[in-house]
Amino acid sequence: MMTPVARCLVPFLLLLVAGCAQYENRRGVEAGWTDAYMHTLQPGVTTRAEVMAALGPPSQVIALEGESILYYLFERSDGEGIVLVLYNRMQIDTQYDRAIFFFDENGLLTDAASRIAAADNG
């Protein structure tokens, strides 16, 4: 049989080994390709050098026959969780901001597209 002190001590010890956790991870190229910037791009006029000067080095360069692609990616993860003695739970939300630019063999823009994930305010 447990003493009254032991009965009070067990829940206290369980609280000591339980806890909360938060998680945040950010990696890639910060999203500099706002909608306003994307509207300034002109196919056949904007050069690869101009895009790289404005946005910096891309996450990935893809060379295809007769064209090249600059791919920009930024990953943002946020999460929280609870760590208990017998049960653990983590919830992580990952968002991706991305932009892709296609250039012809002369380094002129042929097409571009982007997406900036909406921030979760909930």
Image (cartoon, grey):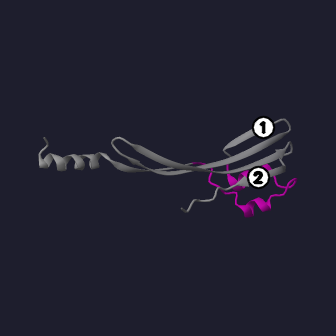
Quarter of the C terminus within the rendering:
bottom right
Are there few (<14), some (14-19), or many (20+) residues within 10 Å of tag 1?
A: few
| Image quadrant in which you'd find residue 87 | top left
| Image quadrant in which you'd find residue 30 | bottom right
Mark 2 secondary-structure assignment: strand
In the image, is 48 to the left or to the right of 79? Answer: right
Q: Amino acid at mark 1?
A: Ala
Q: Residue at (17%, 47%) from the top-left corner?
A: 7
Are there few (<14), some (14-19), or many (20+) residues within 10 Å of tag 2?
A: few
Read off the magenta span: 27-56
Give how far across and how far down residue 101 sits, in percent. 77, 49
Q: Residue furthest front?
A: 1
Quarter of the N terminus within the rendering:
top left
Q: Residue at (35%, 49%) from the top-left corner?
A: 19
Which residue is at the front of the view, 37 or 2? Answer: 2
Q: Residue furthest top?
A: 65
Which label was assigned to residue 63?
Answer: 1
Q: Residue at (46%, 46%) from the top-left corner?
A: 90
Gap in angstroms between the C-alphas marked 1 and 2: 18 Å
Q: Residue at (74%, 45%) from the top-left corner?
A: 70
Give how far across and how far down residue 95 sits, in percent. 60, 51
Does the segment drawn in magenta span residue 102? no
- Residue 25 in sight: no
- Upstream in sequence: badge 1 or badge 2: 1
In the image, is 40 to the left or to the right of 31? Answer: right
Q: Amino acid at mark 2?
A: Ala
- Residue 115 in sight: yes
Which label was assigned to residue 113?
Answer: 2
Mark 1 secondary-structure assignment: strand
Which residue is at the front of the view, 34 or 9? Answer: 9
Question: Total label count?
Answer: 2
